[in-house]
Amino acid sequence: MDSEAARTRARRADAESTQPRTSSAGPGRTRTRARYALATLGALSIAAVFATVGDGVEVPEATGLRRIVVDSGHLAVWILLGGAFGIAAVRGEWNRASGVLAAGAGATYAVFLGAVFLGRA
């Protein structure tokens, strides 16, 4: 009798392991993923515009490292934000990796603003 029960349990476990698993994401989580995905598309669209057309910020007296920050800082901010939202969209929630990228975007933006405004006399 015990061997019969053991075989039945083994068959059930085997059947469960071959069935596709369904996502545990409910409607709220799906909606959250969609919102993060839209934010990702928005951020990366802005980054694409900044990469092709530019951001309209001109500081003619900037040279060296300051010039690099002024020319590419704004673009870097939007790429980092796109990455943060993209990770959140894939994982279905805001998480540590998203927060680190978003904090990096904030720090990059602070450096960018400093390069644009603090260097002017």
Image: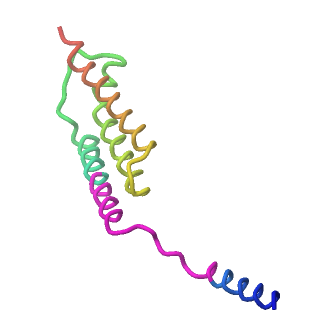
**How was this image coloured?**
rainbow
Q: Position of residue 62 (x, y in %)?
A: 26, 17
Q: 21 or 13, which is in the foreground?
A: 13
Residue 104 inside the magenta-drawn segment: no
Quarter holding the N terminus is bottom right
Q: Residue furthest top?
A: 121
18 magenta-colored: yes
Residue drawn 75% across the image and 88% down it: 5
Q: Is residue 96 above or below residue 13?
A: above
Indicate the quadrant where residue 71 lies. top left
Whether 52 is drawn above or below 64: the answer is: below
User: Can you give x and y, in whole percent of width and height, for residue 57 in the image?
Assistant: 19, 29
The residue lying at 32 percent from left, 18 percent from top is 66
Q: Which residues are magenta?
A: 16-39
Quadrant position of residue 28: bottom left
Q: Position of residue 19 (x, y in %)?
A: 58, 82
Dominant secondary-structure state across the stretch colored magenta:
helix
Residue drawn 31% across and 30% down?
73
Work out whether 61 lies above or below 19. Answer: above
Q: Nearer the viewer, residue 114 or 59?
A: 114
Nearest to the observer: residue 14 or residue 89 = 14
Q: How many marks?
A: 0
Residue at the front extreme of this rendering: 1
Quarter holding the C terminus is top left
